[in-house]
Amino acid sequence: MEIIQEQKNFMPRLDLHCHLDGSLSRTFFEEILGRRVEMEELQVAPDCRNLAEYLAKFSLPFQGIQTARDLRYAGYDFMRSAKADALDYVEVRFAPVSCCMQGLDVRTAIESVLNGVKRGREEFGIDFGVIVCAMRGHSEEDNLAMLRTAREFLGAGVCAADLAGDEASWPMRGFRELFGEVKRMGMPFTLHAGECGSVENIAEAVDCGAVRIGHGVAMSGHEDVMRLCRDRHIGIEMCPTSNVQTRAVPGFDRYPMREFLDVGLLVTVNTDNRTISGTTLEKEIRVAQEQCGVSDEDIVQMMRNAVEISFAPDEVKHRLWKRFGGRTTA
Ligand SMILES: [Zn+2]
């Protein structure tokens, strides 16, 4: 018991599912907008109980990341928050095409975020990877062009691709070709699936070649899909607070984290949108333990899983493994 407690105190802390636009600080907005910003403008109310209310909070962040300067600052600001949350490694994701509404080009958008997070890494000593999100609501042409540009930065700050956006309106099957192409490019990817859509989206995402699934809550109770994910070593990026706020699950008592851990899935705990959800990794760990039936041992296991499934280069993974006491395998 004491050994686990000690491991928990010293374990590396990783957040693998975190959106840049939903995680920018109040200071960031006050500086770029030049006015006082109330937290209610940025964060969902504690009693947020639907997806529409949640998504409405993205409108201000969306306006805040449309220039190269603001994107650089956003990348830096994100790393500053990661430092405040005592993270050791973070994967931050954003949708470059969504940052080009005022004429910016995708390449500059990616470079600007990379410059910001790199500055943050130097100042705060936190390793990172940037995940670029194709959007379900964007055209295939825009998504593909963005992914081709992002591929040039793979290994130079960009670590993977993702698919985000309204899952219920745009099911996974419409993106098979796109991600078939991403696979051919040699770019690894995680896909948002089973957050507010069907369990079929999860099976299709795995079939498409996704090595990780964002959320995945819809596979609760579906033994065949859980087995598929377990047998293929698919990483599961769970985000408890966000999933309750958007009604992906009715409450923490129904959150399938315990169920997924028991099945042997590579479960991880993450924040999703730090500012919009009003959360930190510290809070997510606490909520998992207090309300989702997760033990100290499970928390350590989830951080081990996070190192294993992260898109980090080997030398970074090696450094993180050492923090568990020198072991180099899960
Ligand atoms: Zn997400």
Image (spheres, rainbow, N blue to C red):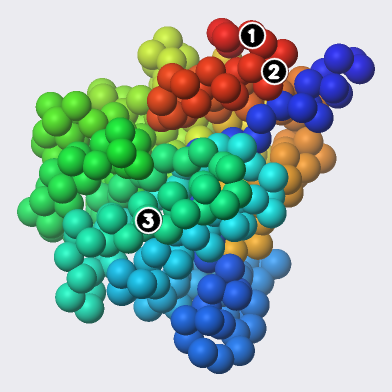
Give the number of the disc on residue 324. Answer: 2
Q: In which quarter of the image is residue 255?
A: top right
- Depth check, front residue: 232 or 129: 129
Q: Quadrant of residue 245?
A: bottom right
Q: Which amino acid does label 3 sit on?
A: Asn
Disc nearer the start of the sequence (1/3)? 3
Q: Mark 3 points at which residue?
A: 115
Q: Name the residue under label 1.
A: 327
Q: Can residue 84 be seen in this view?
A: yes
33 in relation to 92, above or below: below
Q: Which amino acid does label 1 sit on?
A: Arg
141 in relation to 9, above or below: below
Q: How far apart are marks 1 and 2 (CA)?
A: 6 Å
Q: What residue appears at the point 65 percent right and 35 percent down from the top-left corner? A: 13
At mark 1, the secondary structure is: loop
Image quarter in which the N terminus is found: top right
104 in relation to 170, above or below: below
Q: What residue appears at the point 41 percent right and 76 percent down from the top-left corner? A: 64
- Depth check, front residue: 313 or 204: 313
Q: In this view, does 260 lie to the left or right of 182?
A: right
List the single residue furthest toward the left. 141
List the single residue furthest toward the bottom. 35
Q: In this view, does 225 lie to the left or right of 318?
A: left
Q: Mark 1 CB in 8 Å range of ligand 1?
A: no
Q: Quadrant of residue 80?
A: bottom right
Q: Distance between the residues labelled 1 and 3?
A: 33 Å
- Spot occupied by residue 157 in the image (x, y as percentages of width and height): 35, 42
Q: Which amino acid does label 2 sit on?
A: Phe
- Spot occupied by residue 221 in the image (x, y as percentages of width and height): 53, 26
